[in-house]
Amino acid sequence: MVDPIGNLGGDCLAEGCVPSKAMREAALVRALADKFGNFGLRGDKPAVDWRAVLAHKDRVQSTRYAQHREEIAQGGALFVQGRGAIVAPNRARIDAADGDTREVGFRHLILGTGSRPARLPIRGAELAITSHELFRIGADLPQPGHLIIIGGGYIGVEAASMLQALGSAVTVLEFTAQVLPGFDAELANFLHASLAQRARIELSAQVTAIECARDGYAVRYTQNSKQQSVQGDAVLMASGRGGGVARRHRPSGRAAG
């Protein structure tokens, strides 16, 4: 097995489902404070220690990483941190992170490279963070005071709900006419109504640019033929994902890595 991250579990464990759910639990616990009065309880809403929340996420990820390493070792499989390339029929080259390079033969090959966060082809796209920067282990992102999320799919909606519950102001810009495009409309509308009580949601918003602004960034978009903009101190690009295999041609044959 060859993987550049160096830990097992793919995107789900490295910067997807597992870390996002670890942060969601912190958000849910804090959100319960809003219901204290319903049970005869009194007290201040817990303050957020952002670094401690990220440390909790890292502990969950590290525990799972250790479990997977043990399982692989027990199964007798070899795991290498690095990148692989197909250099000839039934031949692959492994470029390990420690500088070692080797060629190996194979009878069967499985490409399980998953996907990567996609960035819109707009001016200033590089100024935005993605789920990688938000959820990776060891993330050093400061908590946004106002987070602008480009994309109202499941990644964007989940991040919006979590970050708002943890104290950030949130604006979601979605290109289509509903959040969670492709999901059942009744469900999407229900979730929209719930989230709209806590966050700003702009539908049919075509983002055209991200620019540096005073104390943060300005995101420009077109909505109903009108030019609009919103400012925040961080921008999350949650506009989908693309394939994780890079293809290129070499004299020795086709390679992917």
Image (cartoon, rainbow, N blue to C red):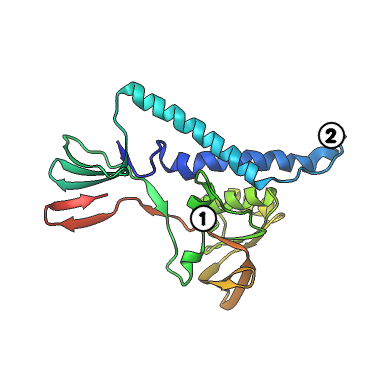
* Outermost top residue: 74
* Outermost bottom residue: 226
Q: Quadrant of the N terminus?
A: top left
Task: Check whether the beta carbons of the residues at disc 1 and disc 2 lie within 8 A of each other.
Answer: no
Q: Where, by quadrant of the figure, is residue 149 drawn?
A: bottom right
Query: What kind of residue is marked 2?
Result: Phe
Residue placed most toward the observer, 141 or 180: 141
Q: Identify the residue position indicated by label 1 in the image.
A: 181
Q: Judging from the image, what secondary structure is the residue with disc 2 in?
A: helix
Q: Residues within 10 Å of mark 2 (few under 14, many from 20)?
A: few
Vertical side of 219 occupied by 86: above or below: above
* Outermost front residue: 99
Indicate the position of residue 183 as horizontal and vertical percent values: 52, 50
| Res. 86 visible in picture | yes
Indicate the position of residue 37 as horizontal and vertical percent values: 85, 39
Q: Residue at x 40, y 37 (%)?
A: 7
Residue placed most toward the observer, 36 or 184: 36
Vertical side of 252 occupied by 146: above or below: below
Q: Residue at x 45, y 70 (%)?
A: 122
Indicate the position of residue 146 as horizontal and vertical percent values: 66, 60
Q: Where, by quadrant of the figure, is residue 147 drawn?
A: bottom right
Query: What kind of residue is marked 1?
Result: Pro
Q: Identify the residue position indicated by label 2 in the image.
A: 39
Q: Is residue 92 left or right of 166 when viewed as pictured? A: left
